[in-house]
Amino acid sequence: MPTHFEIHDSFISEQNQKTNDWVKEDYEHLSKKLRRQNVDIEDLVAKAQGFRFAIPSWGVGTGGTRFARFPGAGEPRDIYEKLEDCGTIYKLVRSTPSVSLHIPWDKPEDAGDLREFARQRDLHFDAMNSNTFQDQPGQKHSYKFGSLTHPEKSVREQAIQHNIECIEVGKALGSKAHTVWIGDGGNFPGQQHFRRALERYLESMREIYAALPDDWRVFIEHKFYEPAFYSTVINDWGTSYYCARELGPKAFCLVDLGHHAPNVNIEMIVARLIQFGKLAGFHFNDSKYGDDDLDSGSIKPFQLFLIFNELVDAELNKEPYFSPAYMLDQSHNVTDPIESLMMSGVELVRAYIQAHLVDRQELTDAQAKCDPLRALATLKQAFTTDVAPILAAARARAGGAIDPIGTFRASGYRQRKAEERPAKMGARASGIV
Ligand code: LRH
Ligand code: MN
């Protein structure tokens, strides 16, 4: 039995044969429909093929909650098996050539060897992620009461050194960005001095910023609560933006969709950060209540479309400093992580292509003439256009699967991995919970 089962390109094209006919039929139909709107469908297929987003290494294992985690069969047990699964996703959806690592969960023994393993699967490394929200075995100072904003300098120094170590690992892996999310905050009124805590954050981040190579960026990730349940130091986009401005031109603001209170207008925050030249990019996911980390587009697909409407408008207007990094950041508690990541990826490309279908002249005119209904109808026409044939064609022409989940299931990949990856007794999943 081959040690590492892989889905071969020949199997993918075999599976595509089975569904090629309907793609062609639907593609022709959509092509005619779009031609009536003076839209060239081939242009949209090229855009879909050019759309890239990163897979979170911690997303290919089964996630859980504080109540429980129900590990699935054939779970990846180390960073190499995680990259195997990321390689499989890239083979099937063809838009995920990069992986975002989390340190120390993915700390490589040999960065060169890991980089080569990734290269053999046409993968490279996206933004690094530090972790000062958990204490590691043997760690000198606890992060129980904070990390970069902790009242004690020794704890802040430890957290700063960890972030600098992440940047060093990232340099060896070819990454060009570092994401800093901290859970620092308080559970009770009076626990933290709000202004001094933010000052300590900036003092710490200045040391991390100074360690960045010239061609790197640092992404500040805000979150309105959790694990702190009364106050969070970097709680919203405004605080993140102030810090990015204070730190300098290599600092930007990363938007994790789940890090906002329910009903916050996230697409407007995106427009602000684009206008201010400080949009780092995204951790895409979806949620109904808190930071649920559910599959992108699964709960609020119209919000995802409206966010991409702002991104495409900026892309078409060639806004300065606009080069957002797109990543998923999800926790797959009840689905096969590979299937969820692929489906979520398809939802990102769908929203991106639908946003390119917005008749911007019509929209601008409706806005100028204070005609809100025509403006909304213009957006809805794009959002309600079924672009599935474009997405399928884009994948198939790039050697991917017309039906990624159908092909994945037909391959028996998960069952084979269950045979190859017997669960390590008492192994603790390296990831959330
Ligand atoms: C915090 C967060 C952050 C990651 C973690 C895995 O909620 O979104 O981006 O470090 O999840
Ligand atoms: Mn995140």
Image (spheres, grey):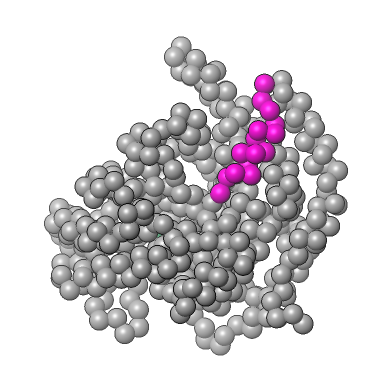
Which span is picked out in magenta?
A: 37-52
Residue 17, percent from left and from top: 85, 51
Question: Is 175 above or below relative to 136?
Answer: above
State whether residue 383 appears in this view. yes
In this view, the residue in front, 186 or 133, is 133
In the image, 240 versus 249, the foreground residue is 249
x and y percent of residue 251 in the render? 31, 50
Residue appearing at x 35%, y 79% in the figure: 136
- Asked whether 90 or 347 is in front, the reply is 90
Name the side, left or right, on which 302 lies relative to 166: right
Residue 43 part of the magenta-drawn span? yes
Q: Position of residue 313 (x, y in %)?
A: 48, 30
Q: Residue at x 60, y 34 (%)?
A: 354
Above or below, comparing residue 322 to residue 227 in the picture: above
Q: How many marks?
A: 0
| Magenta span includes 427 | no
- Identify the image quadrant of the C terminus: bottom left
Image vertical order of residue 52 relative to residue 431, above or below: above
What residue appears at the point 73 percent right and 47 percent down from the top-left corner?
Answer: 397
**Which residue sits at x=70%, y=39%?**
390
Against 22, residue 86 (above or below) is below
